[in-house]
Image (spheres, rainbow, N blue to C red):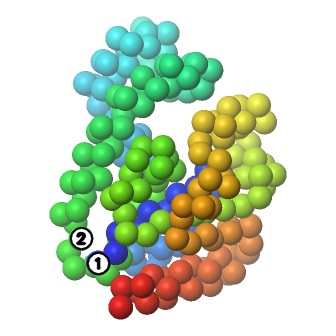
């Protein structure tokens, strides 16, 4: 059994790799989805309202307002992370019960090193692409400005620092067919590592 993290900065192709792996029949946990679930929990929204009241209009929560607030104030971002990260870590550790004899389990997690989660994984895969492609993908997908992209990208660990820590790098700046071939090669290498 190998527990493998897929990491990389925003817009580098983690979700695309994860979706291809799911299509191949692999179990892939999505940490961003776990995080989104929190915003549907009344207990969590109550804490957000107490600490970030400006992100509410009456009882209506504005997630974009929260994002803008924390990406412009590092101390508020760190506080928000202190609310979210323990929940995510519990989810990750609880997910161990779902292995059910699978050879490889993947987890899509952007802030792997920032949260200190590398200790939980046997191998780490970095989704990588050049900066301009990354920026254009995010601006188009999220409808944000280049300035907003840089704010988000700048709080994540730098690409060169990640490359020195990971076991595998998959460049996603290619055709889907080529990306599938690169992922098949990754699977083969992961299986060989286990032997």
Quadrant of res 130: bottom right
Q: Secondary structure at mark 1?
A: loop
Between 1 and 33, the residue placed more toward the observer is 1
Q: Is residue 66 visible?
A: no
Q: Secondary structure at mark 2?
A: loop
| Numbered badge on residue 42 | none
Crowding at dot 1, Cα within 10 Å, few <14 / some 14-19 / many 20+, comes out as few
Q: Are marks 2 and 1 in contact (CB under 8 Å)?
A: yes
Which residue position is annotated with label 1? Answer: 1
Q: Residue at x 49, y 19 (%)?
A: 76
Separation of disc 2 and disc 1 at Cα? 8 Å
Total marks placed: 2
Q: Is residue 125 above or below residue 152?
A: below
Number of the front mark, 2 or 1 = 1
| Rendering coords of residue 32 (x, y %) | 45, 47
Q: Residue at x 36, y 38 (%)?
A: 85
Quadrant of res 147: top right
Which residue position is annotated with label 2? Answer: 99
Q: Quadrant of the N terminus?
A: bottom left
Crowding at dot 2, Cα within 10 Å, few <14 / some 14-19 / many 20+, comes out as some
Residue 190 as seen in the image, left or right of residue 184: left
Residue 143 as seen in the image, left or right of residue 18: right
Between 157 and 16, the residue placed more toward the observer is 157
Q: Is residue 111 above or below residue 24?
A: above
């Amino acid at each position: 059994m190998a527990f493998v993290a897929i990491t990389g900065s925003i817009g580098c192709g983690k979700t695309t790799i994860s979706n291809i792996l799911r299509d191949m029949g692999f179990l892939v946990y999505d940490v961003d989805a776990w995080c989104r679930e929190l915003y549907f929990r009344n207990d969590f929204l109550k804490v957000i309202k107490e600490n970030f009241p400006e992100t509410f209009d009456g009882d209506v929560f504005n997630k974009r307002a929260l994002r803008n607030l924390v990406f412009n104030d590092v101390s508020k971002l760190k506080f928000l992370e202190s609310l979210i990260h323990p929940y995510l870590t519990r989810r990750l550790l609880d997910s161990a019960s779902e292995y059910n004899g699978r050879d490889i389990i993947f987890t899509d997690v952007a802030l792997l090193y920032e949260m200190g989660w590398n200790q939980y994984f046997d191998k780490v895969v970095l989704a990588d692409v050049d900066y301009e492609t990354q920026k254009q993908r995010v601006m188009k997908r999220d409808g944000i400005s280049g300035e907003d992209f840089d704010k988000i990208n700048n709080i994540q660990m730098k690409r060169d620092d990640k490359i020195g820590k990971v076991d595998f790098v998959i460049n996603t700046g290619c055709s889907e067919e080529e990306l599938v071939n690169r992922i098949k090669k990754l699977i083969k290498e992961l299986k060989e590592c286990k032997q």
